[in-house]
Amino acid sequence: MPARLPDACLDQVFRTARTRNGWTAETVSEALIREMYDLAKMGPTSGNCLPGRFLFITSDEAKARLAPHMSSGNRPKTLAAPVNVIMAYDMAFADRLPELFPHNPGAKDWFTSNEALTRETAFRNGCLQAAYLMMAARSLGLDCGPMSGVKLDGINAEFFAGTTWEANFVCNIGYGNEEGLFPRNPRLSFEEACGIL
Ligand SMILES: Cc1cc2nc3c(=O)[nH]c(=O)nc-3n(C[C@H](O)[C@H](O)[C@H](O)COP(=O)(O)O)c2cc1C
């Protein structure tokens, strides 16, 4: 039976988690990167289509390739973080549907010759999976710093040329510190952002 998580867990993942701009020198192991993905991959996507793709940038060489495509304000913190994830999605995700959604063998055909539906589905579910990855990171005691201030065309040309992957945004991951931390901004109240019918 699912049970309500302890408050300490809700605090860590939601209430006290912050978007980090400064990073300690502590590294993130490949085992932890894999654990993060293995949690995130379990989040739901439409028709189990799983279009999210994640390129984990960890080496100095790869960071040097990514840095020119970050906005000037985002570049220093990207270089300082131990891991930068290029949150991407695969426009050819439908090719895997016969395996991923076997109880509907026709699912792949929904997307044949329908670029608009393919893009909408890849983007919607790719965004969801990127969010699952950030929540998985926080659940494992890591911090995140997502950034859309990037040149997507440049990242696509540098890392995904000749593939069907497309970049969405970049997220720094590691162990954050207080450096460059903005004051906590307000959130919309339930009354402002929600309805109940
Ligand atoms: C998709 C996305 C893109 C963002 N892009 C940038 C960015 O380019 N540069 C930046 O400094 N912060 C960026 N942010 C950080 C947000 O401003 C921050 O997450 C938000 O203000 C909430 O901050 P908090 O988590 O500390 O409360 C981005 C956040 C998200 C989710």
Image (spheres, rainbow, N blue to C red):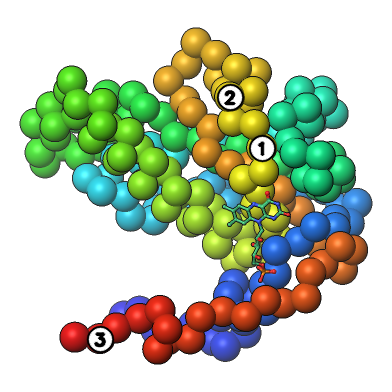
Furthest residue toward front: 192
Sequence order check, earlier mark of 2 and 3? 2
Q: Residues within 10 Å of mark 3 (few under 14, many from 20)?
A: few
Using the image, determine if residue 49 lies above or below residue 137: above
Q: CA distance from mark 1 to mark 2?
A: 9 Å
Quick one: SS at disc 1?
A: loop
Tell whether 178 sits left or right of 68. Answer: right
Q: Name the spot of residue 185 as percent of width and height, x first.
A: 67, 76
Using the image, determine if residue 179 lies above or below residue 192: above
Q: What type is the residue that disc 2 sits on?
A: Asp
Q: Is mark 2 within 8 Å of ligand 1?
A: no
Q: Which mark is residue 150?
A: 1
Q: Is mark 1 within 8 Å of ligand 1?
A: yes
Quick one: SS at disc 3?
A: loop
Q: Residues within 10 Å of mark 2 (few under 14, many from 20)?
A: few
Q: Name the spot of residue 128 as percent of width and height, x first.
A: 42, 52
Query: Relative to the observer, which residue lies in front, 189 or 174?
Result: 189
Q: What type is the residue that disc 1 sits on?
A: Val
Q: Quadrant of the N terminus?
A: bottom left
Q: CA distance from mark 3 to mark 1?
A: 37 Å
Q: Residue drawn at (54%, 53%), measured in percent from left and top?
A: 133
Furthest residue toward top: 162
Q: What type is the residue that disc 3 sits on?
A: Ile
Quick one: SS at disc 2?
A: helix
Q: Which mark is residue 194?
A: none
Q: Quadrant of the C terminus?
A: bottom left
Query: Relative to the observer, which residue lies in front, 6 or 180?
Result: 180
In the picture of the structure, the residue carrying the numbered disc 3 is 196
Q: Residue drawn at (42%, 43%), measured in percent from left and top?
A: 126
Q: Is residue 24 visible?
A: yes
In the picture of the structure, the residue carrying the numbered disc 2 is 153
Using the image, determine if residue 46 lies above or below residue 92: below
